[in-house]
Image: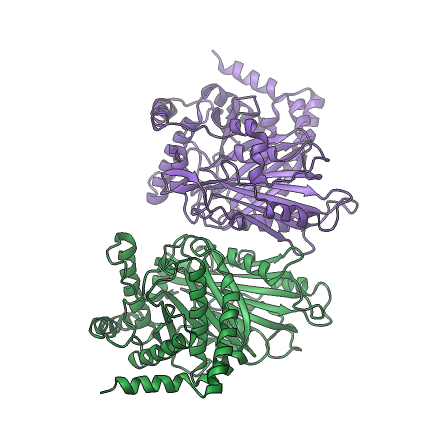
Chain colours: A purple, B green
Amino acid sequence: MRLLTAVDQLFLLLESRKQPMHVGGLFLFELPEKANSDFVYQLVKQMQDSDVPPSFPFNQVLEHLIFWKKDKNFDVEHHFHHVALPSPARVRELLMYVSREHGRLLDRAMPLWECHVIEGIQPETDSSPERFALYFKIHHSLVDGIAAMRLVQKSLSQSPNEPVTLPVWSLMTRHRNHVNAILPAERSVRRILKEQISTIKPVFTELLDNFKNHGDDGYVGTFDAPMSILNKRISASRRIAAQSYDIQRFNDIAERLKISKNDVVLAVCGGAIRRYLLSMDALPSKPLIAFVPMSLRTDNSISGNQLSFVLANLGTHLDNPLRRIELIHRSMNNGKRRFRRMNQAQVINYSVIAYAWQGINLATGLFPKKQAFNLIISNVPGSEKPLYWNGARLQSLYPASIVFNGQAMNITLATYLDKIEFCITACSKGLPHVQDMLMLIEEELTLLEKTSKELAFQGITVKDKCAKKTKKLAP
Amino acid sequence: MRLLTAVDQLFLLLESRKQPMHVGGLFLFELPEKANSDFVYQLVKQMQDSDVPPSFPFNQVLEHLIFWKKDKNFDVEHHFHHVALPSPARVRELLMYVSREHGRLLDRAMPLWECHVIEGIQPETDSSPERFALYFKIHHSLVDGIAAMRLVQKSLSQSPNEPVTLPVWSLMTRHRNHVNAILPAERSVRRILKEQISTIKPVFTELLDNFKNHGDDGYVGTFDAPMSILNKRISASRRIAAQSYDIQRFNDIAERLKISKNDVVLAVCGGAIRRYLLSMDALPSKPLIAFVPMSLRTDNSISGNQLSFVLANLGTHLDNPLRRIELIHRSMNNGKRRFRRMNQAQVINYSVIAYAWQGINLATGLFPKKQAFNLIISNVPGSEKPLYWNGARLQSLYPASIVFNGQAMNITLATYLDKIEFCITACSKGLPHVQDMLMLIEEELTLLEKTSKELAFQGITVKDKCAKKTKKLAP
């Protein structure tokens, strides 16, 4: 038995039928070249018939919302589902299936995860093999999104020839040392309380700071985000939209403008959101603000505990893409300076305060202009090496996240091989046709490629422009 | 806009993540003999592309839990799902899929129904055609189980040659007159309140009556049901088990013993439940009590409003099948005499009182031996004529129902052509392997066939035996 941490509790308390608190990972595989027609069936059967018990944390079940304990009646049928998509099924149909599953609450009487194998997805091109997918869904109180993606990736192989004979949820034993580093450590009540209390000062310092600083529009305060249709109450229905884009295109733009790849990603998101809101005649006159979690660790095996975040001004009020990207670059630089170090508990407590404020707004309508940010845009770890599942090559991986009341859209990204994988999780009732965002991202990316080429030809970079501006402002 | 009735409200209030309040119908079809391989795809496409708006009640959405109003943003993608089962898929795999879907809450931001077309189900025999299924799920606050089954059946055709070009949810216009008779009438607040108040007297008279009558074990009082594993708190996970049995087998037994077919159905259920509980070492020493709703109407087109019910003693404590069937027969006769007429509101209010009692028990453990009944065994209307969907023959229909805290199993039956369709809905966490019930029903049916033949050979009938017993008891 293990006591629930305050963070675990928080994710269970915030959960409601309209607001499930699980994250998901969608992994798209290509059948091996000479695979039998029953390749997926055999893979599934092997997982279903396995008598190896699930490993930690997949064997943990809630006890009175106070403890995690080992589930003694583990029944794989509750957790593992095998379906097919009706022919002809494109990735669009796969995403429809995953959207539905992502909107459904997990059963708290069992360990809080589910695994779906989905077969029958059309080949990418006529000459490539048919595809199947793995959708893994796990409650945020059990592991966070970053750990969830890592856990599944760890269960895959870096070799096309390595047979994988154990189910994903039992595989962890194979990598026990790696996995321990991913998972939250067992902590005493004393330590949890201490950690919580230690967050009070930095969180409130930050909140107070917001009321003092004004001036540069690259500085984003805590309650600077405008109201928008992204910040409505949510329904229980989800839409997951996901697509892969060549990372080289982002790198080229970043290099030409002398800014970071991350700035380019935010500029593309900002531009696409601007187009999406314009199409619905719902663009606020003030710029949208994104909450961008930043990992301070460079070590890939450890995650979660060392998080910081930046509030980025997405410049959605600006029509000129160059001015937008400039603003993003400056606000990111300012933000990074401000929150140099915050631990996860601080980030979460800070978010709770921001959310509480938003809750008051939603209930009373008293401070409709006061909110911390409009959406979360985050990165989860991908892989630089190709991954395989029993010889089937992983083609793409998409991280599906959580949306909240007042936060109806989330964008989560991962890098895999030479692609950036965009995954948008949204409330499908409040934000109709959110899949259009994928096309708008492509349009924005194309525009930035063109603009950056022209600027590079003229010898102009965003870095220089921002540096000049900062100089001018200095006395 | 239409005011929610007290009954609508009740089903919304009772609903929780562990206790969804929708009913479901599973309809299994055979592909037409000369169907193209894309028959189901075309059927689905036609439904998806239809621009005919959904008809009442499929267009009704909740407004602040007070009104039903017409949904102006109807989006078919939220309601209609098309999936396939991975090959090889038997009815078992279909039921696994439906079990999962049946355990999931509907989104209250949209009209409270969903329709799933599931393809890829193996043929029944080598020479018969492949099968596909329609699973229709609708909230009990919108229509009850009987109306739900009727609505879908009305949308089907009695001819294999009639094309069906509209989706199920728009089809109703075709049968507007029939459908009006199925659906609850629009009622004023005054009328609803009057109806509710009128239930108080009969419900309390019945409750008081229970404390007065003792003696004959064929008399079932309101709080005579023993505790059993069927009466535990439920989890959010469901298991649907369903199978068809030849109606002739039930009729033969009924005729030999001179009892009703309904008595035989209850005897088979009672015997199977006895075997199931024995296998788990959980058979109570007192007999289980079933709540059996009885329709007083013979007119098929009108339903719901004229319901009565009987508490049937299932005789699960008796090993001898003949003694069990005798007890069932007598308790049904007594029950029918007692509750000659109760309207639906009375039945529901009565049930609420019984449930409230059970709630006190579960929370406090004060009166563990006081509860009204152990499970609901009910009948919904089927069809005597074969039904078709665009030429595809309906092979079977199974009604999936609701389980509650303290009522972890429900058995609902329908008659279609020459079969009785059994559908068991259960909490899969509290009642593991409930699908074993199907085999136990078959075993019990075989035993009763054998026993009744022997008795008929000796010239003994249950009716006569019961008549003799009643004579003896009379002064």
- Compare residues A217 and B78 and report the one nearer the observer: B78
Q: Image point 45% across, 50% down: which residue?
A: A235
Residue A86, percent across and down?
A: 66, 56
Residue A277, percent across and down?
A: 53, 43
**In this rendering, position of residue A246 left or right of residue B118:** right
Q: Quadrant of the C terminus of chain B?
A: bottom left
Residue B324, percent across and down?
A: 39, 74
Which residue is outermost to the right?
A127
Q: Quadrant of the N terminus of chain B?
A: bottom left
Q: Image point 49% across, 86% down: which residue?
A: B457
**In this rendering, position of residue B93 left or right of residue A74:** right
**Which image quarter: residue B15?**
bottom left
In this rendering, does residue B147 appear at all? yes
Residue B301, percent across and down?
A: 46, 80
**Which image quarter: residue A454?**
top right
- Compare residues A110 and B116 and report the one nearer the observer: A110
Q: Image point 47% across, 38% down: which residue?
A: A140
In this rendering, does residue B150 appear at all? no
**In this rendering, position of residue A464 left or right of residue B324:** right
Which residue is outermost to the top?
A475
Residue A73 vertical placement versus B392 (above, below): above
Residue B205 vertical placement versus A186 (above, below): below
Residue A4 vertical placement versus B263 (above, below): above
Residue B436 vertical placement versus A186 (above, below): below
